[in-house]
Image (tube, rainbow, N blue to C red):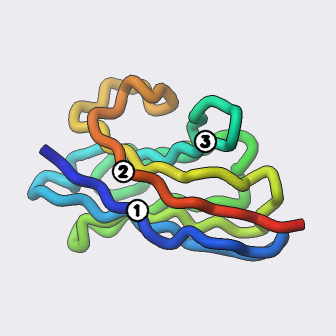
Amino acid sequence: QVQLVETGGGLVQAGGSLRLSCTASGRTFSSYAMGWFRQAPGKEREFVAAIINRSGSSTYYANSVKGRFTISRDNAKNTVYLQMNSLKPEDTAVYYCAADSYYTGTYQSRGAYDYWGQGTQVTVSS
């Protein structure tokens, strides 16, 4: 069983930055594909970013965040990060970290991930 704990959410003005962290329990973190999703009120949970391989060189982003958000990982700390710059009010959501213990190439689908964190609120004011 893997437990994921997100931190770093908060309230920020439009144009500002936040960095989310997700720390995982367990010894096999480096082998997991990791993803970030978000869910705004009244909307479905949507894909934000994924980091697929151990080295962190393979990353993917939703079009809405490409160029503004960066996903990275530190395997020594069992942690994945989401650096969010140039934040917009439409980025307001609960952000969830997710782990895929057996990556099969489907990084955008919620169903591909085995473990989820509890979420952290990000609010961007205009």
Q: Is residue 120 above or below residue 108?
A: below
Question: Decide: marks 2, 3 in contact (CB < 8 A)?
Answer: no
> Is 56 left, or right, of 62 in this rendering?
left
Q: Local crowd at mark 2 within 10 Å, few (<14), some, or many (≥20)?
A: some
Q: Relative to the observer, which residue lies in front, 102 or 38?
A: 38
> Which residue corresponds to the image point at 30% horizontal and 37% vertical from the top-left?
100
Q: Compare marks 2 and 3 and give the one earlier in the sequence.
A: 3
Q: Local crowd at mark 1 within 10 Å, few (<14), some, or many (≥20)?
A: many
The percent coordinates of residue 76 (x first, y second) are 21, 72
Question: Decide: marks 3, 1 in contact (CB < 8 A)?
Answer: no
> Which residue corresponds to the image point at 72% horizontal and 57% vertical from the top-left?
67
- Could you tell me how far apart the alpha carbons at marks 3 and 1 are, in whole angstroms? 14 Å
Q: Compare marks 2 and 1 and give the one earlier in the sequence.
A: 1
Determine which of the numbered discs, if any, sits on residue 117 in the image: 2
Q: Relative to the observer, which residue lies in front, 102 or 1?
A: 1
Q: Quadrant of residue 44?
A: top right
Q: Secondary structure at mark 2?
A: loop
Residue under label 1, please give it.
6
- Could you tell me how far apart the alpha carbons at marks 2 and 1 are, in whole angstroms? 6 Å
The percent coordinates of residue 7 (x first, y second) are 44, 69
Q: Local crowd at mark 3 within 10 Å, few (<14), some, or many (≥20)?
A: some
Q: Relative to the observer, which residue lies in front, 117 or 76?
A: 117
Determine which of the numbered discs, if any, sits on residue 39 in the image: 3
